[in-house]
Image (cartoon, helix red, strand yellow):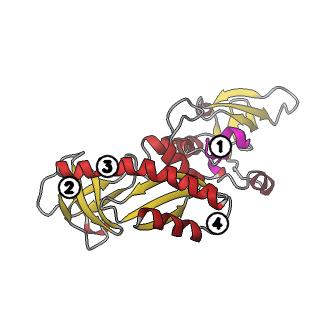
Amino acid sequence: MATIIGVRFKEVGKVYYFDPKGIDFAENDPVIVETARGVECGSVAIANKEVPDEEIVHPLKPVIRKATAADLKTLEDNKKKEVNAFNICLDKIEKHKLEMKLVDVEYTFDGGKILFYFTADGRVDFRELVKDLASVFRTRIELRQIGVRDEAKMLGGLGMCGRPFCCNSFMGEFQPVSIKMAKEQGLSLNPVKISGTCGRLMCCLKHEQDAYEHLLHVTPKVGAIVETDEGKGTVVENNLLTGMLKVRLDSRPEAAPKVCHRKKVKTVRDGQIRVDRSELEALKGIE
């Protein structure tokens, strides 16, 4: 076992483990730590706790110190510089006529590097832009191309549910989302209905998947052969949330389907949920 603290560098970002070096930290304490890109100021997301060694990538970098008032002032000054750097970079992008959208600017804590995050449809030759920016700021410049999901996480906004984006409000890391999840949850495979503002599959599909997998386990799927109190039949429709089924009885195939609850039938042979190749092709590019 090893004692760690978890540190987050963005309000809703990934949590990284550090060695507290015997110092007790409370949640939300500002700390100065050494990272792969230099000295950074972060916020404690996980107070001192012991975790198994297999959960840690050794060696753990140590915490340098708890952030002082001077450190917090430096952080505030960097935020103001970022606004200015953003506007300057916009002008330079327009000057060089580059097909790219600037999303965010970030100063490292020690000011040794400025990161410019952007989106673009394809590859962008920004070598001249980097030289131009370096001549203005006299420090290391890094331009980093990000995806539309990362853009949504950085900028934030409201989803179709009326709530703030999941990625911007509580998700530390993106989870894989698939068309199969939408299919299993009985959603219409219409890109407009299953895509978030970023144009990719909604993250909430992943949040709800465990519940739907359980319901699929206990509910006969469409196409399943079941035994009812009136004989065998085929499930033609199901509602996973209510558990209600519509069963076309073998003895009365032309009649209206029998409506019954999943607890009132016995599954003889369950159905399967498959995503057709044509459906995948139609939804290509939103996963």
Task: Identify the residue position indicated by label 3 in the image.
Answer: 77
Q: CA distance from mark 1 to mark 2?
A: 38 Å
Task: Identify the residue position indicated by label 4 in the image.
Answer: 124
Kindly report which numbered mark, 3 or 2, lies closer to the viewer in this rendering.
3
Which quadrant holds residue 5? bottom left
Kind of residue at badge 2: Lys
Residue stretch rendered in magenta on the structure: 180-199
Marks 3 and 2 close (CB-CB < 8 Å): no
Residue 2 painted magenta: no
Kindly report which numbered mark, 4 or 3, lies closer to the viewer in this rendering.
3
Kindly report which numbered mark, 1 or 4, lies closer to the viewer in this rendering.
4
Quick one: label 1 or label 3, which is nearer the N terminus?
3
- Of residues 15 and 35, the one nearer the viewer is 35
Quick one: label 2 or label 4, which is nearer the N terminus?
2
Task: Identify the residue position indicated by label 2 in the image.
Answer: 49
Quick one: label 1 or label 2, which is nearer the N terminus?
2
SS class of the residue under badge 2?
strand
Kind of residue at badge 1: Ser
